[in-house]
Amino acid sequence: DNDQLTEIINHVKANDENSNPEYFGAAKGKNIIMIALESTQSFIINNEIDGEEITPFLNDLIQSRGTYYFSNFYHQTGQGKTSDAEFIIENSMYGLPRGAVFFSNPENQYHSLASVLKSEGHYYSAVFHANNKSFWNRNIMYNALGYDRFFSEEDYEIKKEDSVGWGLKDKAFFSQTIPYLKELKKPYYAKLLTLTNHFPFALEKADEIIPEWTSKDGTVNRYFTTVRYQDEALKQFFDEMKREGIYENSIFILYGDHYGISENHNKAMAQFLDKEITPYETIQLQRVPFIIHFPGRSETREITSAVGQVDVKPTVLNLMGINQEQAIQFGTDLFSTDKREFVILRDGSFITDRYIMTGNKCYMRDTGMKTSKESCEPYIQLAKEELNYSDQIIYGDLLRFLP
Ligand code: GP9
Ligand code: MN
């Protein structure tokens, strides 16, 4: 009820950190093109397999002018996978401890990124995903999230030779999305969800740019080839956007949605990374790429502080010059200068400037050495509280009580 909401508002306000005024409005009025990189983890960035770069395009993008690369960005998803990532990024709230909020609470009121961009910045919003529109209950949930249009499977021409695994290949998906982008009412917020780099990472030989790896684990072996394919599809998409005049007036946000390689594949991962996959390493493997690219800006920066998906919405709103003093959100502008490092994962594990806690054990963040539990103790309750407040908002549909 209302009292519960007041308590949560007080908690959020008490933990509020200021967004960076230098970036306020830095991308005001630009089109926003957000790209979800399916199952893409950070360990493939600036890395090689048998002497071949795995993500040459992303590696270049990270080095180019106008790019901000967050190298310690963690996914915070639970069982809702892709849909959790979407939810967290739209709302700066956490997904649920079990199940997917896309299925359980699609009738709630939300103050999503799309709806705030619309009310405060007159943005039109669209999602592009060449899968069945009811997958993850998207067709229902997207109404609650306030998107104007959902381009799904029905809007794409899906020829047999253009599909693999879960559906339309990323190259065809991007190419067919271009004409739709050109028609969108400006300014727009477009979100594109890729698909080819999805378990079990199927790819036809003709689409392979690098060969499969040679470990005993076929899943991990194929992962490198589908990530490499996705990277090539991105390159092609950026080239096409430049040709079609979409690139210049847009800002790009790329994020990995969640892990692709589960703990069942630790053996091959240990072989690839040349180290044992301890619980500490498992947390480090929850890092996913996060890249903001601004055409026309001259800076290139790598930001190494520990951050997460809950931080995306406040960052985008600040860049768009939208004031968010009254917003209930659990993240902070990624450019904030007083942002404290405290990333909470859905299972209660967390990362601070100095520590990583997982499986009830506390580790030094820099070395991975076990340390006394007392060091992590002050954060344990905070992490629980934060997740719990987010859950309460969802279970009680509490945002409906806001003015
Ligand atoms: C399906 C795609 C993949 O539409 O979003 O979902 P995932 O299995 O990664 O949650
Ligand atoms: Mn996914």
Image (spheres, helix red, strand yellow):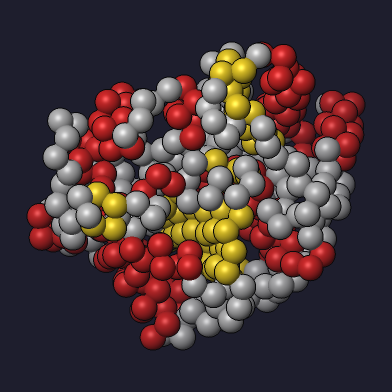
Residue 112 in the image: above or below residue 244: above
Residue nearer the viewer, 377 or 199 = 377
Position of residue 98 measured from the top left corner of the image (x, y, whole percent): 53, 23
Q: Is residue 383 visible?
A: yes
Position of residue 233 measured from the top left corner of the image (x, y, whole percent): 30, 65
What residue is at 72 percent from the left and 14 percent from the top?
374
Q: Is residue 121 visible?
A: no
What residue is at 34 percent from the left and 58 percent from the top?
55
Displayed quadrant of residue 393? top right
Residue 192 lies left or right of residue 5; in this view the side is left
Give the number of callouts. Answer: 0
Residue 255 lies left or right of residue 189; in this view the side is left
Residue nearer the viewer, 118 or 356 = 356
Residue nearer the viewer, 100 or 12 = 12
Position of residue 174 measured from the top left corner of the image (x, y, whole percent): 34, 67
What residue is at 60 percent from the left and 50 percent from the top?
304
Position of residue 66 measured from the top left corner of the image (x, y, whole percent): 57, 73
**Which quadrant, please, contains the N terminus?**
top right
Displayed quadrant of residue 74? top right
Displayed quadrant of residue 161? bottom left
What residue is at 60 percent from the left and 27 percent from the top?
364
